[in-house]
Amino acid sequence: MPKLRVLFIVQGEGRGHLTQALSLASILRNAGHSVCKSVVSKGGHEIPSYFEECLQSPVVEVPSGHFFVNQETRSIDWGRTLVNNSFRLNEFNRSFAILSELLQSEKPDVIVNFFEPLAGFFMLRERPKIPMVAVGHQFMFLHPEYQFPTGFEVQKISTLTFTRLTGLGAECRFALSLYDAPPLPDKKVVVMPPLLRQELFDLPDDVSEPYYVIYLYHHSLSKDLIAWHQQNPAHRLHCFWNNDQADEVTHYSKNLTFHRLHSTRFLEMMAQCQGVVTTSGFESMAEAMYLRKPLMLNPLHRHFEQHCNGIDGTRVGAAIQTSDLNLTPLLEFVRTYDYDATELRQWIGKADEMYVRELEMVVSRASSDSAS
């Protein structure tokens, strides 16, 4: 097949979708294809500086919706989120205009949407001839083999609705999963391995140093971590946070250090730690499981998607799930941890071949349809 020109559209909230984009860009380069440009939605956080450097292609920022976190409850503030985004329709229209211009100037063969809802609405409104592939572990929610947590029916319905909206207009939906499952042709869903950064596979997986790594979705959560640290000062903690106002490294005390997000530092420190704490982000979970690191999952309150991720991790014995940043249960879990990552590693090892094949198939089908 001729070399493909791929346009990325990436949700900028959190680090997970950015990580997926970096991984797929590397896979495409190795196969002789290229990412012509990446459109990244600018939500509540600055896009990390490492993203464009590692992506090796230009990045265009566009306005999009984003979540607000309640400083008191440490949960998603849905009321503020909905009201704020409803007043930004003019900004979203500018984003649609930018996307239209890029399709004209870059002439990509395929669009890859990393779970950015703007892309779904753009495809619905503009109906470009260029095919789109939607990527996200959330598309696994559409699979009958996926196990949801019980007692969240309203959240389940709203999450499924949002997932379908994000995948509007997609020729194929890549459902990222920790395990293989049959495809769903009627829903245009193909189950795929996690998209993890290539640097992960070069890291040692048999090292354990006496410290713990924590990822915080919002810097306000640091108050809870500091409270636990003050009661347990002997344990070394390295915390990574989204705090644009902080220095690159902040030493709170001898054994508690805060780091701004960094392209390789998080992975390198995770590979050598005794245990990992994360807000149930899919990529962080998969990375820790691949490295055989005990996981404590601390989903954001009222964030149904993260509770779903937690179910996946705990079901296979790779993690425990808690409702706060009390790290004591993790210390106990480390002593009994016996998760076997063999099947996960074999599944992830198929990623490069599967993603190239499936993307090339989408472009081939689109070319055949346009020619007929």
Image: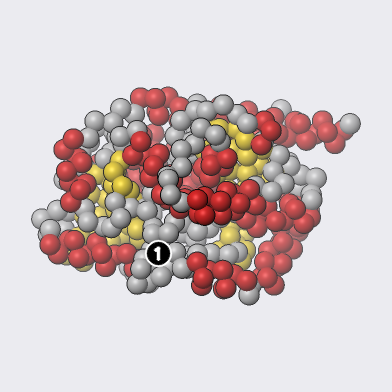
Residue 282 seen anywhere in this rendered image of the structure: no
In the rendered image, which quarter is residue 336 located in? Answer: top left
Q: Residue at x 85, y 36 (%)?
A: 370
Residue 123 seen anywhere in this rendered image of the structure: yes
Q: On the picture, is 178 further left or further right than 29? A: left
172 is higher (above) or lower (below) than 167:
above
Q: Residue at x 35, y 68 (%)?
A: 73
Q: Residue at x 33, y 53 (%)?
A: 298
Depth check: 168 or 151 in front? 151
255 is higher (above) or lower (below) than 307:
below
Q: Residue at x 74, y 63 (%)?
A: 97
140 is higher (above) or lower (below) than 70:
above
In the rendered image, which quarter is residue 29 located in? Answer: top right
Q: Residues within 10 Å of mark 1 (few under 14, many from 20)?
A: some
- As helix, strand or loop, the secondary structure at mark 1 comes to loop
Q: On the picture, is 170 further left or further right than 273? A: right
Residue 214 screen position, x and y as percent: 29, 53
Residue that mark 1 sits on: 75
Residue 354 screen position, x and y as percent: 57, 28
Scheme of colours in the image:
secondary structure
Depth check: 57 or 327 in front? 327
Quarter holding the N terminus is top right
Of all residues, the one furthest to the left in this rendering is 234
